[in-house]
Amino acid sequence: MHPKLQKLSLYCFCLQPVATEAMNYVRNRFWNKGKTERPSKGDGNGPHLTITPGDVEEAVHYMQFTGKIDLTELSFTAESGGTGIESFLDVAVFEVPSHCSSHNCDLSRYGVGSMTHFNGMSYLSLCQAGRLFIDNNFFQGFHTQLMVPSEGPMPSNMKKTNGIFKVPIQNRNYNVMLANCNDNGRPVSLRGQVVFDFEENYTPITPRSLTVLTSVALMVCLLFSCLSIKIDRGTRAHWEYQRFQNVEISREEQIRERLQVYNSNSQDGETEVESSEHDELRPESIS
């Protein structure tokens, strides 16, 4: 293969079945935290992903409902390296067909990248002249950029004015792409998350979720019905029975107390009678 095409293949995706693994690897690396790099000891920002110069990271997400894709939760850090030139990190969000979520597709049809043909094979080149190639004649999506200076820090976050992409149509697949195309630029470390949010005051209820909610509501109604029957019959009857037992116990205690008082009074009366009899039988003293 020609040396220039070998370099081109570092950030191009071949439109052949063998390249499917490469595309899936990029998607998994972008979203799976288990494949992200761990920060150095003492860094409390959590896992991060490093986008090296000439690298493109992208992932496809299915938006079932209208809403927005929020990129303002992402945090960017320019790492040391490069050749001391200024570069840009391109961020693009655009709609793609459903088959692009699991297989390679020609993104140039949607205004991203350009096709290169060599020896009967087709290559999709995403980068051109150190930038993500966007064809405005076909591109219908969201595109912004962050400047990566030759030295010093870069903008750490995207502003809300250019970091939120609205999704006006539901049941669509959207590709989120981050491109650090300049081979001589600096590596960019990425932390945080892409937020896929539903529209405000919108309740995403599907037929399946509606069935589940209805089943739960019926179970709750049945449970409260059983409890009300238990309270009306079983619990009230038990309360009446317990009340009757308490009354019987109190009556028995009163009777027992009266018997004790009667017995004590009887014993006191017998003692007085015996003492009087002894006094009568006692001989009179001789004067």
Image (tube, rainbow, N blue to C red):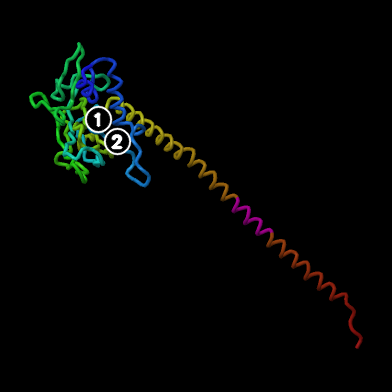
Determine which residue is flagged by label 2.
Answer: 49
- Relative image position of residue 53 (x, y in whole percent): 23, 33
Q: Quadrant of the N terminus?
A: top left
Is 251 part of what is drawn in magenta?
Answer: yes
- In this image, 215 relative to 70: left or right? right
Q: Mark 2: which secondary structure?
A: strand
Number of residues whose C-alpha sits closer than 10 Å to that of mark 1, classed few (under 14), some (14–19) or many (20 or more): many
Residue positioned most to the front: 3
Q: Residue 78, located in which quarter of the rendered image?
A: top left
Give 165 or 128, whichever is nearer the viewer: 128
SS majority, magenta: helix
Residue 247's x, y, as percent? 56, 50
Residue 49, percent from left and from top: 29, 36
Q: Which residues are magenta?
A: 249-259
Q: Is residue 271 above or below residue 135?
A: below
User: Type of residue at label 2?
Assistant: Leu
Asked if residue 261 is among those painted magenta in the image, a careful observer would answer: no
Q: Residue furthest top?
A: 120
Is residue 271 or residue 81 the one in the foreground? 81
Q: Which residue is mark 1?
A: 57
- In the rendered view, tell whether residue 247 sits above or below residue 131: below
Mark 2 surroundings within 10 Å by alpha-carbon count, few (fewer than 14), some (14 through 19), many (20 or more): many
Marks 2 and 1: in contact by CB < 8 Å?
yes
The type of residue carrying mark 1 is Glu
